[in-house]
Image (cartoon, rainbow, N blue to C red):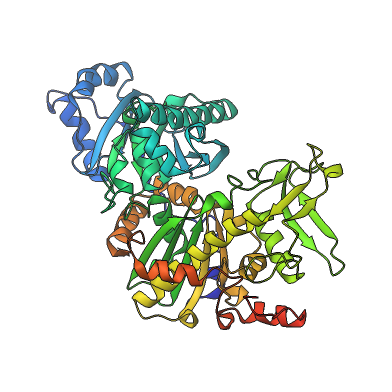
Amino acid sequence: MDDENTILQSGVQSEIELAPITRRYFAEITPPSLADNRGDVERLRQLLFPAFGNVHIPFRLMRNISMICRDANWRVTALLGQTGLGWELLDFEAGDTTGRHYGLAIDIGTTTVVASLLNMQTGACLGTVAEYNGQCVYGEDVLTRVFRALEPDGAPLLQQAVVSTINGLIKKLCARIEIENKEITAVVIGANTIMVHLLLGLDPSRICREPYIPVLNSTGFLRASDAGIKVFPDGVLYCLPSVGSYVGGDVIAGILVSGMHKRQEVSLLVDIGTNGEIILGNRDWLVACAGAAGPALEGGVVASGMRAEPGAVDEVHIDHNGVVRYHVIGGGKAAGICGSGLVDSLAEMLLAGIIDRCGRFVDNPCQSFIVVPASDSVNEKDIVITQTDIDNIMRTKGAVNAAVEVLLESIGCSMEEIRYFFAAGAFGKHLDIESAVTIGLYPDLPRERMIQLGNSSLEGARQALLSIDKIKEAEQITSKVTYFELNANQSFMNKFVGCKFFPHTNLEYYPTVRARLAERGLLQPALR
């Protein structure tokens, strides 16, 4: 059995042995002589061989090697990068420049892009910044953006939007750390399959059409200039590989960070964002599926919804007298309610008897619940949860339930056999586990086995940036995953209909919630 403390630290940045995908190598080359008449390029290649094997040296760099060596009195720095076939010389500089070597780990989410600048010599994170994905103006969800990409000039517009967002983050980081962007020599990206296609200007249209096939699942090693990312032009660009149309590199990052692919016990990983991805398995097998999930939880279709930013209600509690207490990000008056606040609200409303297990208001004429009165809101309007909001969230959580059940049935596994549950993604990091279990969004497992990973897409990108072995590990993970396509799965549709109750149609799956409902005398039939 795995050591419990090791498991519980899964959400923390793990220490890894540094073997970054680009390296600066300082060397003092022995000058030529009558007794050693090797060519300058051969001299450099042979010097690098013990550490890097046969290094490919492009002709464009060969032209300047002789001059740089002599001008620098044979004290030089070679910048090398991975190509998939081995190491390649990316640049050649006079003197020792190994101290200025940086890389970028990026999580491209449908809503938000997050970037971390890393010192490639030490592995230290020098800063992290985030910004809304510039593509949001073309659609809140990925499918809307896919359709927009099919319009004339649509694909270039979407590509430019996300690249501009990334380059803006790079500019902020470089200004903060006081470096030049050309000193960033490597970029690793965690993103879903559609985001990678839009970043690279690839046609995403077949992803949403049967049989749901992407242009590619693995980009291999590219150049930063291929995507217009403003770092060292010949710097290495690597996108974590995907498994299928809706299980992308961000999910592979989650598996990598959780370590579930190395464990004997069965684990369940759920990443709920604009899409919901679910992974089940252990070191011997992994199965995955995905489906639309997030707009109902990210504020996109909620009456008083907004993103998790200053002014958003992110925590809600209702006491036994029906008094609502809430927390606002950044303090002050509330402007709206974000995903974690929505989940809290529904859980508290269920336990307070305000809504029943069907998600219907017990007081039939009531069509909304006031979380924040107008007098305490920025816009002087009530911040509410409506019946439509509840119905949308019910569909989201029902889809997650149904997907988990399909995976369990597909490999003959029961819920009791799940040892660990991992909540991946930034949304999962801030979500209250008790609230998520209460409405059935998460399974009812012992809480000590439920681990919030945080932004595992960014962490997976960080690990891959700093270790070529982690890239190999990620690619091995993709080869192990069996992908279940839910779009044409009748069993999923049948279960989806049956899962549209809080927390579930079958309360046997949720013993702690059943007990809490029983304590409050709320075990009325799900249907009236």
The quarter of the picture where residue 475 lies is: bottom left
The percent coordinates of residue 424 (x first, y second) are 52, 58
Check the image and report above or below for 234 versus 468: above
Q: Is residue 495 left or right of residue 512?
A: left
The answer to whether residue 229 is seen in the rendering is no
Instruction: Give the number of marks.
Output: 0
The percent coordinates of residue 431 (x first, y second) are 63, 58
> For the point 38% across and 62% down, which residue is it?
289
The percent coordinates of residue 216 (x first, y second) are 26, 46
Q: Is residue 447 left or right of residue 81?
A: right
Q: Quadrant of the C terminus?
A: bottom right
The quarter of the picture where residue 158 lies is: top left
> For the point 83% across and 43% down, which residue is it?
374
The answer to whether residue 502 is seen in the rendering is yes
The percent coordinates of residue 217 (x first, y second) are 29, 49
Camera-side residue of 423 and 460: 423
The quarter of the picture where residue 423 lies is: bottom right
Q: Is residue 313 left or right of residue 480?
A: right
Camera-side residue of 256 and 91: 256
Camera-side residue of 219 and 133: 133
Point out the residue furthest to the front here: 365
> For the point 38% across and 37% down, which residue is it?
147
